[in-house]
Amino acid sequence: MEQLGLHPEKVTLGEVILAEGNLSIATLEKVDGALQAHGFERIDDRKSRLIEAIKTKIIHLISP
């Protein structure tokens, strides 16, 4: 994120909170490209975010 000029405030499993407010479409496309290059994808709809949050909680519960 920092290489894209963004400032992450918090990074946890499956989530990054940025200091920046709303990002432009061009910036979101750059973020998408960078994430995809590393095998990740941005989740931007409510249902998908909920599913990812549940997955993350389950991973934390079953991990030692």
Image (cartoon, rainbow, N blue to C red):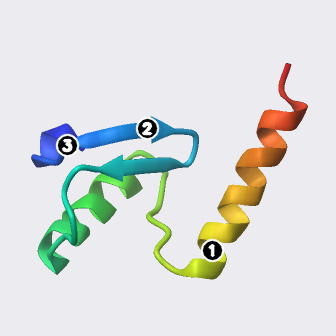
Place of residue 12 in the rendered image (x, y in percent of width and height, measured from the top left): 52, 38
Do callouts 1 and 2 mark residues in contact (Cβ within 8 Å)? Answer: no
Q: For the C terminus, which image quadrant?
A: top right
Whichever of callouts 1 and 3 sits on the residue coming sooner in the sequence is 3
Q: Mark 3 points at which residue?
A: 7
The residues tagged by marks 2 and 3 sit, at their Cα atoms, a distance apart of 11 Å
Residue lying furthest right in this view?
A: 62
Instruction: Identify residue type, mark 1.
Output: Ser
Alpha-carbon neighbours of circle 1 within 10 Å: few (<14), some, or many (≥20)? few
The residue drawn where x is 29% and y is 52% is 34
Instruction: Identify residue type, mark 2.
Output: Val
Q: Mark 1 points at which residue?
A: 48
Say left or right for 23 vs 56: left
**Helix, strand or loop for disc 1:** helix
**Helix, strand or loop for disc 3:** loop
Say left or right for 52 vs 46: right
Say the numbered circle drawn on residue 34. Answer: none
Q: Name the residue under label 2.
A: 11
